[in-house]
Image (cartoon, rainbow, N blue to C red):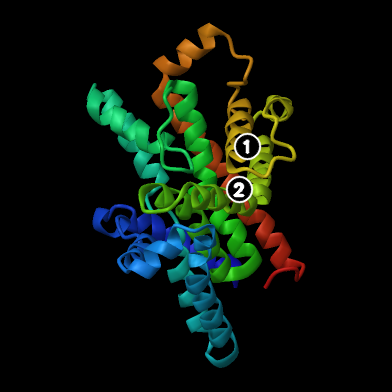
Amino acid sequence: MHLIVIVVALFVERALGQLRRWRDVDGFARYVALIERSRAGARWLSHPSGVLVIAPPVLAVALLQWAIEHYLWLGVDLIFGVVVLVLTFGPRDLWEDVYALAHARSEADHDRAAACAAALCRSHSGRPPADRDGQTIVGAVLVQGHERVLAVLLWFFVAGPAGAVFYRSVRELPVLAARGTGSRALRRTATYVHGLAAWIPARLTALLYALVGRTGQALAAWPAARAITHASGAASWRLLAAVGRGALGLGRGADARTRRRTDEELNDTLLEALGLVSRALLVALAGLALLTIFGVLR
């Protein structure tokens, strides 16, 4: 069932990716904004315990998931899983964003290209990095492949729709805390929870990048990322970027000539990065199929 839901959801998500109005829907942000409107809610969200704001939607989906599995027919379970999974992808389509950047660069639309690059390179706190050269943008695409798609799928593998909602919520919370009334303590707590939720999926994704790319260079880049035991989100993103670039042949030790070539041929390199994400996704689906065949997952 999980495999069928994921395949259908990926197809639907790609089809709906062309509908910009659909892609702009972000229910979790609206839910948090609704709580912030009240004085008590804003005060709660300014405290570290405000990270528990993710609990009601996750529990609601988990209860609905349990009720559907036990009391309704199989088709409802499938439809529910597809709807939840599509809503937890994104909120923007990674392929669409990268193609927009490549098109802007091809048309020499520097302002549009800079805006697209800044959106791709935003950190888990919502802040764009100071340096956005070709290597940074490629690394950001590889990180976003994990954040927007692969991590959501891996959590769905584990806990179904509730798992997907959980990861989407903890991923969005640091950005919302930085934008809203959240205190520094809340931002630190939200970032830490996000890092914990991403620790295993990020390393599985890094392994997938290494498997479907240049394995030797990818694995050689792993120790240099200094992210083996760190539970922070920043360490996981550093690992994904380093291993992914290694899988593309753009390792940490790349010389100045290689970096210039990356900047000059960035569009081709971005498409290669998307191809790496796509291949990693296919391998992940193949692994899920094997687990389903052997009865580990249903």
Q: Considering depth in this image, is 269 or 239 the residue closer to the camera? A: 239
Q: Quadrant of residue 223?
A: top right
Q: Is residue 298 above or below residue 63?
A: above
Instruction: Kindly indicate whether the residue at mark 1 contacts the one at mark 2 (C-beta within 8 angstroms).
Output: yes
Residue type at the position of mark 1 = Ala
Residue type at the position of mark 2 = Gly
Residue 280 is at least partly visible in this image: yes
Check the picture and name the quadrant holding the N terminus. Answer: bottom right
Q: Is residue 104 above or below residue 96?
A: above
Neighbor class of circle 2 (other Cα within 10 Å; few <14, some 14-19, many 20+) is many
Residue 15 locus on image (x, y percent): 35, 57
Return the disc, 2 or 1, that comes first in the chain's sequence: 2
Residue 45 locus on image (x, y percent): 44, 61
Mark 1 = which residue? 235
Using residue 112 as the reference point, say whether residue 190 is left or right of it: right
Residue at point 64%, 51% (across, down): 196
Mark 2 = which residue? 195
**Label 2 vs label 1: CA separation?**
8 Å
Q: Quadrant of residue 164?
A: bottom right
Q: Is residue 257 above or below residue 206?
A: above
